Amino acid sequence: MKIAMIGTGYVGLVSGVCFSDFGHEVVCVDKDTSKIERLENGEVPIYEPGLDALIERNVQGGRLTFTTNLAEALKDTQAVFIAVGTPTRRGDGHADLTYVMAAAEEVARAAEDGVVIVTKSTVPVGTNRKVAEVVRTANPDLNFDVASNPEFLREGAAIDDFMRPDRVVVGVESEHAQDVMGEIYRPLFLREFPIVFTDLESAEMIKYAANAFLATKITFINEIAALCEKVGADVKQVSKGMGLDNRIGARFLHAGPGYGGSCFPKDTKALARIGQEYASPMRITETVIEVNEKAKNRMIDKLRDLCGGSFNKKVITVLGVTFKPNTDDMRDAPSLTIVPALVGGGAEVRVVDPQGRHEGEALLPGVQWHDDPYEASEGSDLLVILTEWNEFRALDLSGVAAKMRTAKLADLRNVYSVSEAEKAGFAAYSSIGRSPMG
Ligand code: NAD
């Protein structure tokens, strides 16, 4: 099977590379010439564990190529995936479909009869039918089908998620599209990972419903954490006790500084917007969006309290700024709200992140970048753990505390315990949903 993948971002690149690993012949296309040049030179433009080795293996195997030339990529291609960005449209929260529709039009002009045009980007209900309309208008003679194939991979664990998915969702309305999609995912089907075939609208809805549900779960435990702090309960014990109930499940029950990233913020906003458009309000999702914004502000208040009421002239070291570990993605990361508040409040802010600097430098003006958490915390008044990279999970806490001007730790990912912080010599320790110390 020959496949073209349009968009070589976090989703397109991982999906294209994994399809080639299934044995398909894959051409990855992007408009960004520097991305394609880097890929052709064996460089990987994003940080995703394991991706470099998988690219190398499949390029060497002759199954994976990269190009900026869409027409060339579409020669003899049975399926073309659209995996371009769908960011939040300015002003109204709607998903911006400009890139999807532009890609659809380009595909229409270059594709060959029998092609299945698959939308992998996260798109509002009705988009696949609009894609079909755009293609039909641009090339009325083309014989094609559409399919909706939303992606559920998580950055940082993307390859494993793609290769061992909980399920694959495919929305189709023709037998031909179902056959082609079944053939593409056959290697997973053979290993008994479920493929759920639905109509187009249901597939589009599943993606938003799933993301909004996960964002709700995170926000729920964050709200419970805030209450735990008031009543003297420990949210780690609470989420363990809740998560062992199979009806609830332990995942996405870790309290933290509020969700961020390239999907949850924009997808919850888009779902709320769809609800408004159809006069079927998504009240729970709307509240989740609002509560999540407040969670980030609650973190700023927590840090200010630790600094004695003001950030002015304090030296604050922040460990981790990417929205989660094992990615270099900074989109909608909580750090983008929290760090500017520290800088704006007059603090000297030092930042350490194993992969975030390249993206983060432009987004976090006024901070100093360091490579080493020990060096960065020297002379600091407050250490903040904002992203739980493995590098920050086993720090020599006594060594860090001894170097600081005032040894205070804000552990916004609950990596350590009150007793560990106390033993290490911290004068104050504050985490999420647990009684503070000092
Ligand atoms: P991204 O911004 O990382 O990548 C998009 C790529 O598409 C860019 O490289 C851009 O240059 C390219 N592009 C745009 N228009 C193009 C065109 N006409 N022709 C060729 N290339 C074009 O985006 P992403 O994070 O990979 O997300 C893509 C989609 O997948 C979004 O809808 C997103 O919601 C969804 N999604 C993302 C994730 C995630 O973890 N990032 C997970 C599941 C679903």
Image (cartoon, grey):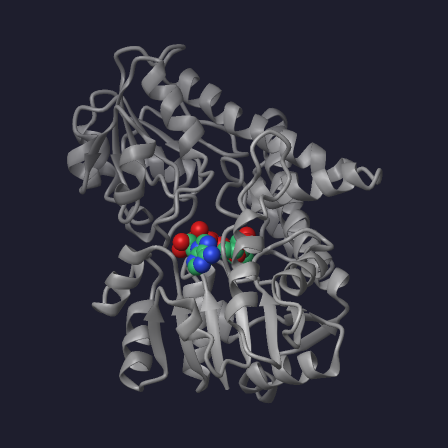
Q: Residue shown at 67%/65% (left/top)? A: 136
Can you see residue 286? yes
Residue extending furthest toward the right: 279
x and y percentages locating residue 51 in the rendered image: 34, 68
Horizontal arrangement in the rendering, residue 91 relative to residue 330 (left or right): right
Between 215 and 29, the one lying in front of the other is 29
Relative to residue 169, is residue 156 depicted above or below? above
Between 322 and 238, the one lying in front of the other is 322
Q: Residue shown at 37%/23% (left/top)? A: 340
Residue extending furthest toward the bottom: 190
Horizontal arrangement in the rendering, residue 114 relative to residue 109 (left or right): right
| Quarter holding residue 317 | top left
Horizontal arrangement in the rendering, residue 43 relative to residue 337 (left or right): left
x and y percentages locating residue 102 in the rendered image: 53, 54
Relative to residue 433, is residue 41 depicted above or below? below
Between 63 and 188, the one lying in front of the other is 63
Can you see residue 155? no
| Quarter holding residue 416 | top left
x and y percentages locating residue 4 in the rendered image: 47, 73
Relative to residue 45, is residue 231 depicted above or below? above
Q: Residue shown at 28%/65% (left/top)? A: 39
Quadrant showing the C terminus = top left
x and y percentages locating residue 428 in the rendered image: 36, 24
Number of numbered callouts drawn: 0
Relative to residue 204, is residue 349 depicted above or below? above
